[in-house]
Amino acid sequence: MDLLEKKRIVIMGVANQRSIAWGIAKSLYEAGAELAFTYQGERLEKRVKQLIDEHMPGSLCVECDVTSDEQLQQAFSVIQQKWGYLDGLVHSIAFAKSTDLDGDFVQTSRDGYHLAQEISAYSLVAVSREAQPLMKNGGSIVTMTYLGSEKVIANYNVMGVAKAALEANVKYLANDLGPHQIRVNAISAGPIKTLAAKGVKNFNTVLDVIKEKAPLRRTTDASEVGDTALFLMSHLSRGITGEVIHVDNGFNIISM
Ligand code: NAD
């Protein structure tokens, strides 16, 4: 069953084969979607292009640092020229300084707070604005969040606050874009060992707790997130918008 046949979807946030965005790309590609990738800066260009050439040859690939309005406009203008329209967008992007992911939240600096908000929360607003005119037949936008927005999780600090803003963005964007038949949702994934996760101190301890306490007694795999993103991109989820879906083997329901 090719649920996403003829669907054109942009994936933002692949850094390497461990990225959640890559797990999502694999699910969408297997379901028949045509994909375009954006990557952050020349540093990642070679690695991302290699991955695509090896596994999804022919996919579009353009640079886009979300802190630059110019790069955002340029990236979506290339997509507009090559494709003409868009059905979906995956936003799998976040960043905070490592010094802000350790110790007391109260010590968060002004610029560290601002940076985390800009890259991890505001960027969803900016990319949705660029994507909207291309989603001529409606569309689906999916972003990635984490439980640290709802509960205090040691060392997640400034990123927890950025994820809370991101989840509020999902609701406001869903309301704005709903009349255009564009849906906006978030997936709250359980912890997965990726490049970004390495920045959070004591990450391995969190994984151990999940193996012990999560109802399904295991940690989250990127393929589980990928298949939920596939559902959210497909017509099967056509009645869902403004929602945060937990893909964490049930960990969020447990009282610690
Ligand atoms: P990752 O490091 O593989 O991906 C993060 C991506 O953000 C990278 O591709 C990086 O290039 C991109 N990025 C950072 N700053 C950028 C900028 N200025 N412009 C453009 N791109 C930029 O790590 P990941 O864990 O796959 O993270 C993807 C998303 O999933 C993030 O939003 C993260 O918070 C979220 N998430 C991760 C976990 C986890 O445990 N790994 C759990 C829940 C949610």
Image (tube, grey):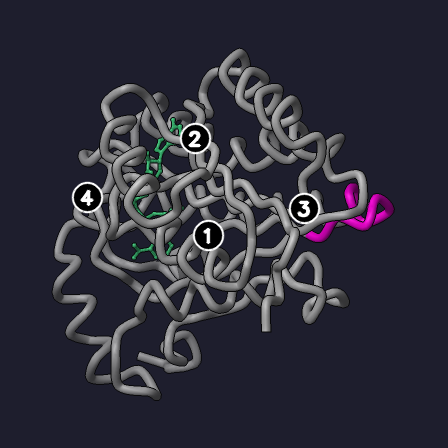
Q: Earlier in the sequence, mark 3 or mark 1?
A: 3
Predominant secondary structure in magenta?
Answer: helix
**Residue under pointer 1:** 144
- Marks 3/2 in contact by CB < 8 Å: the verdict is no
Q: Is residue 37 left or right of residue 166?
A: left
Quadrant placement of the N terminus: bottom right
**Which mark is nearer the camera, 1 or 4?**
1
Seen from the viewer's position, the closer of residues 190 and 44 is: 44
Query: Which residue: 40% across, 57% down?
Result: 26
Q: Which residue type carries mark 2? A: Cys
Q: Which numbered dot is residue 199?
A: 4
Query: Which is nearer the eye, 165 or 135?
Result: 135
Q: Nearer the viewer, residue 23 or 168?
A: 23
Mark 1 is surrounded, within 10 Å at the Cα level, by few (under 14), some (14 to 19) or many (20 or more) other residues, namely many
For marks 2 and 4 on the same chain, the one whose residue lies earlier in the sequence: 2
Whether residues under marks 2 and 4 lie with C-beta atoms below 8 angstroms apart, the answer is no
Q: What residue is shown with label 3?
A: 87
Q: Return the residue at label 2.
A: 61
Residue 69 to residue 177: above or below: above
116 versus 206 height, above or below: above
Instruction: Tell me what residue is drawn at x 25 percent, y 80 percent.
Output: 218
- Rendering quadrant holding ligand 1: top left
User: Looking at the image, is mark 4 or mark 3 earlier in the sequence?
Assistant: 3
Residue name at image x 32 percent, y 27 percent: 112
Q: Amino acid at mark 1?
A: Met
Does any atom of ligand 1 lie closer than 8 Å to the CB of label 1? yes
Quadrant of the rendering where the C terminus is positioned: bottom left
